[in-house]
Image (tube, rainbow, N blue to C red):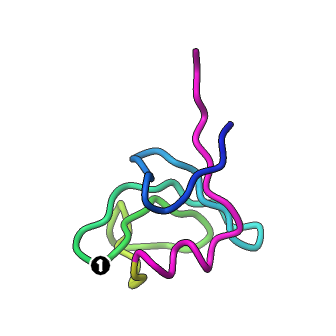
């Protein structure tokens, strides 16, 4: 796995924050969309009220599995 920055995120990237795991979907404007676990959400993927700049600060890591 390679650790990524927020500017080169792609659909399917794994985001970790304080033991919570989400799978990135996309940015639409300033909102981040992700598939997430631990709570019940009405929409999948769930739109997060998080600006792109905050994703880099709030998440402990962003990873992508690269298969050769």
- Counting the numbered discs, the total is 1
Taking the view exactly as shown, the residue that stands out farthest to the right is: 19
The residue sitting at 55% across, 58% down in the picture is: 5
Residue 28: quarter of image: bottom left
The residue sitting at 62% across, 79% down in the picture is: 58
Q: Is residue 7 magenta?
A: no
- Residue 22 image offset from top left, x and y in percent: 56, 60
Closer-to-camera residue (38/30) = 30
- The residue where tag 1 is placed is 30
Q: Is residue 44 above or below residue 9?
A: below
Q: Is residue 28 above or below residue 50?
A: above
Q: Which residues are magenta?
A: 52-68
Closer-to-camera residue (57/42) = 57
Taking the view exactly as shown, the residue that stands out farthest to the top is: 68
Q: Residues within 10 Å of mark 1 (few under 14, many from 20)?
A: few
Residue 21: quarter of image: bottom right
Q: Is residue 56 magenta?
A: yes
> Which quadrant is home to the C terminus?
top right
Taking the view exactly as shown, the residue that stands out farthest to the left is: 29
The residue sitting at 58% across, 52% down in the picture is: 4
Secondary structure at badge 1 equals loop
The residue sitting at 36% across, 61% down in the picture is: 45
In this rendering, would 19 be left or right of 14?
right
- Residue 34 image offset from top left, x and y in percent: 43, 62
In this rendering, would 60 be left or right of 5?
right
Q: Is residue 32 above or below residue 12?
A: below
- Residue 41 image offset from top left, x and y in percent: 43, 73
Q: Is residue 35 above or below residue 47?
A: above
- Residue 52 image offset from top left, x and y in percent: 41, 75
> Which quadrant is home to the N terminus?
top right
In this rendering, would 30 be left or right of 39?
left
């Amino acid at each position: 796995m390679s650790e990524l920055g927020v500017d080169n995120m792609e659909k399917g990237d794994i985001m970790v924050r304080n033991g919570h795991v989400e799978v990135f979907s996309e940015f639409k404007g300033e909102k981040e969309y992700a598939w997430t676990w631990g709570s019940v959400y009405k929409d999948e993927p769930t739109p997060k009220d998080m600006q792109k700049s905050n994703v880099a600060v709030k998440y402990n890591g962003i990873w992508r599995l690269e298969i050769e």
